[in-house]
Image (cartoon, helix red, strand yellow):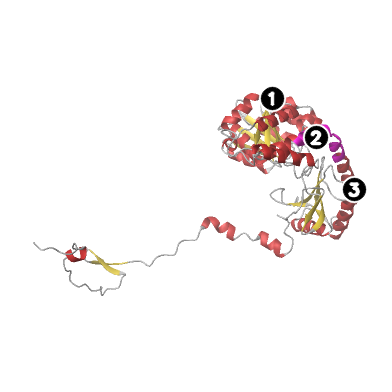
Amino acid sequence: MIYHDKPPTLEDNRVDQPETYPSLRPPAAREINNRPVRRKAPASPPPCALLAKARNFKTANQLRALGLYPYFRTISSAQDTEVIIEGKKVLMLGSNSYLGLTNHPQIKAAAQAAVEKYGTGCAGSRFLNGTLDIHLELEAALAKLVNKEAVLLYSTGFQVNLGVISALVGKGEYVLGDKSDHASIVEGCLLSQGKFLRFAHKDMAALESRLRKIEPEAGKLIVVDGVFSMEGDIIPLPDLCRIAGEYGAAVMVDDAHAIGVLGKHGAGTASHFGLTDQVHLIMGTFSKSLASLGGFIGADAETIDFLKHHSRPLIFSASMSPANAAAVLAALRIMAEEPERSAQLWRNTRRMKQGLRDLGFDLGDSETPILPVYCRDLMVAFKVCKRLQEEGLFVNPVVSPAVAPGQELIRISLMATHTDAQVDFALDKLGKVGKELGLI
């Protein structure tokens, strides 16, 4: 027996292999089963068709090149009657803070206290671990405001409309909406499994014509804005409720721009007309009069319980932050204790509206603190916006798809905290720019 100082390696045991030589054929002509096969050169990957629309989107850059791009302007101060943009003080006429509460010390203190008690977030949905006692307190306060049995909070106003409409309207049912309804209503209708029918703006004859063609036994929901966010006019709720009752349709009113503005104690459109018992669902947001973020739906207790277990945007979204909820509670208290805020908002509205009409501006059919100054031309709207900012006014240009082409406008919105001097300053600048660009 022969002993080795080290165990044999794989190399030591390997049988000698004959020397090999590279093939003389080019790589593209290797053989498979003794038959030459030519490989195709690798093809370049196809272009991503999905993103072609993004690559071809040029409108924003064209407006930037002209110095007319009006969106995503950076504000470096609180949302108040005056804001700071690019280091300059500008009069804010484009905010939805109708009661002027976004910078109120009591509301800021309430939000800070909520962070100290609850932390910065809930880390879950209302359905699971995200329901706090402050949420229930806020729901009770809102139910009292809008005079409904129960209220359910959502993280944003957009989610309210998505979640409520899509949960309630099923296959074989119908949802009907005004053609000027907010985009969130439209998206909620499209998300539902029912058939979406639209009627001309505030045209009750058109609504009734739609309802007349629907089978009587089918479920029907009519969804409208109480105050239309661009035009500033109010839905003719008495006629709508009468028609809905005749055809067995449920009524839902989006009061995003009516809470704090219309109705007893700022309760909204249904309260304004005395029709709360005929409006089945009242929706509202917190990002306008109530100085926060989020939204709610008010209805009878059974409907709210149904939504708690069927509304996917509620169930699968993180719940409203404690600070936001506390801010709304504080805003509701101030709104109840200081009714003079609403009165001042309407005084400011009348002063601005009369001044604009005296100057010769077309304000359409506005009935609220939303005052549309119609330009009816895309580029004119952008030019007016730019010139007004140069003159010290912040306004919002509204173009398609927010309004129909040819209905472009400058949206002016008043706050309770605007002063007479600020309103008069704005009228002076609007008159100057309106004459310069041929609007008056």
Q: Which element type, helix, strand or loop, lies under badge 2?
A: helix
Between disc 2 and disc 3, the foreground one is 2
**Label 3 environment density (alpha carbons within 10 Å; few <14, some 14–19, many ≥20):** some
Q: Main secondary structure of the magenta part?
A: helix
Inspect the image, locate mark 1, and give the three-letter code of the amino acid beneath it. Glu
- Up-down relation of residue 91 to residue 270 (above or below): below
Instruction: Kindly identify which residue carries mark 1.
Output: 149
* Residue 37 horizontal/vertical position (percent): 28, 66
Q: Do the residues labelled 1 and 2 touch (CB within 8 Å)?
A: no
Q: Which element type, helix, strand or loop, lies under badge 3?
A: helix
Looking at marks 1 and 3 on the same chain, the residue that comes earlier in the sequence is marked by 1
Please tell me which residue lies in front, 402 or 2. 2
Instruction: Kindly identify which residue carries mark 2.
Output: 335
Asked whether residue 263 is in view, the answer is no
Looking at marks 2 and 3 on the same chain, the residue that comes earlier in the sequence is marked by 2
Inspect the image, locate mark 2, and give the three-letter code of the amino acid beneath it. Met
**Label 1 environment density (alpha carbons within 10 Å; few <14, some 14–19, many ≥20):** some
Between disc 1 and disc 3, the foreground one is 1
Tell me the number on the disc at residue 355: 3
**Is 83 on the left or on the right of 29, as rendered?**
right
**Is 203 on the left or on the right of 7, as rendered?**
right
Which region is colored magenta?
330-345
* Residue 258 horizontal/vertical position (percent): 77, 37
Between disc 1 and disc 2, the foreground one is 2
Where, quadrant-wise, is the C terminus in this rendering?
bottom right
Tell me the number on the disc at residue 228: none
Q: Is residue 334 magenta?
A: yes
* Residue 251 horizontal/vertical position (percent): 69, 30
Q: Which element type, helix, strand or loop, lies under badge 1?
A: loop
Please tell me which residue lies in front, 24 or 231. 24
Marks 2/3: CA–CA distance:
28 Å
Q: Residue at x 21, y 63 (%)?
A: 10
